[in-house]
DNA sequence: CTCCTGGTTGATAACTATTATCCGCTAGTA
DNA sequence: TACTAGCGGATAATAGTTATCAACCAGGAG
């Protein structure tokens, strides 16, 4: 934990530790606001902006994951048939993925959950961005 | 098309037709704003709010699908290991789904895409909301 | 232990995506 | 063609998130 920060060269502050510990203790996938509400009891001076910035930092360090898509905007599609998506993490491009084998995934075994459908999100680099990244490495 | 509207009892206006046709003609999963930009050339009087409202209408009619998650807020998770989610469409609750069989999905065959990972989103009703819906039906 | 310095914090303003409001107008029906 | 419920347009309002910037703290040098 402490090492992860040192390795990345970012200071380990009280606030960052507090945000991470709170998040690790909860299993309800809280939003930034929700974390802020919980934390302000123990740290009244904590700012909401700090929670956002800290979550961002932790995310880039790979210590935390985001549940929802990284693009804030809702994006639409005239294709209603079941299909899946490949999202480019660099440019945000969304490509359709048609693969019937993905359509027949078994429903989750979580007790009482009534499944209505599912979708698979692949994330990675699209052809164009993969090439660009390649060039940078050279 | 025209029937879908009649069946649902909603008027088929020029604007709705225009939005749908534009969306059907594109395959880049445009956002509301992006559609608005394209449409305002042919329909200068079109309002952005109308695009939003129309997309919402089309979505509830099942004629259009949203790519991103329905919850606007980003939600975080201290679990970095590969796992999946079951999202309740009624209350927004997110449950973790651990199922190794889902972790080994084949990467998309889209040309040039460099996959980094994937996640499966189940959507449906959680145990609590399924019960509530049941009561309403009675 | 103390000082220094760059990165961080906190408070707030700004910004972006989306939704609500209100009034004039239009699609669908008779 | 006339009627009327619902829609469209313009704008304000809202929610979530990010930018700004002065004051402050963590962590290394001395």
Image (cartoon, coloured by chain):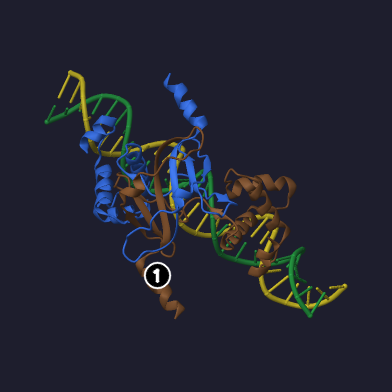
Chain colours: A blue, B brown, C green, D yellow
Residue A2, above or below B53? above
Image coords of residue D21 (percent x, y): 42, 36
Q: Callout 1 environment at 10 Å: few (<14), some (14 to 19), or many (20+)?
A: some
Image coords of residue B20 (percent x, y): 66, 54
* Quarter where residue A117 is shown: bottom left
For residue A47, say whether it is visible.
no
Residue, disc 1 = B130
In what quadrant of the picture does the C terminus of chain A appear?
A: top left
For residue B64, say whether it is visible.
yes
Q: Is residue B2 left or right of residue B52?
A: right
Residue A93, above or below B136? above
Q: Is residue B117 left or right of residue B18?
A: left
Q: Nearer the viewer, residue A78 or B94?
A: A78
Residue A130, above or below B26? above
The chain letter for the residue carrying disc 1 is B
Residue at the spot x=49%, y=26% of the render? A132
Residue at the spot x=37%, y=60% of the render? B93
Residue C5, above or below B36? above
Mark 1 residue element: helix
In what quadrant of the picture does the N terminus of chain A appear?
A: top left
Image coords of residue B44 (percent x, y): 73, 49
Please state the total of marks drawn on the protein image. 1
Q: Is residue B57 left or right of residue A116?
A: right
Residue at the spot x=39%, y=69% of the render? B129
Q: Nearer the viewer, residue B119 or D23?
A: B119
Image coords of residue A16 (percent x, y): 28, 42
């Amino acid at each position: 934990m402490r090492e992860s920060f040192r390795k990345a060269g970012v200071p380990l502050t009280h606030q960052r530790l507090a945000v991470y510990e709170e998040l690790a203790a909860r299993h309800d996938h809280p939003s930034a606001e929700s974390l802020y509400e919980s934390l302000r009891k123990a740290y009244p001076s904590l700012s909401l902006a700090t929670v956002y910035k800290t979550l961002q930092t932790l995310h880039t360090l790979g210590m935390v994951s985001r549940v929802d898509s990284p693009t804030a905007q809702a994006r639409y599609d005239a294709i209603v048939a079941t299909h899946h998506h490949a999202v480019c993490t660099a440019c945000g491009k969304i490509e359709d993925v048609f693969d019937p084998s993905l359509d027949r995934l078994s429903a989750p075994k979580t007790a009482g959950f009534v499944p209505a459908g599912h979708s698979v999100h692949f994330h990675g680099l699209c052809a164009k961005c993969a090439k660009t990244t390649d060039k940078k490495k050279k």
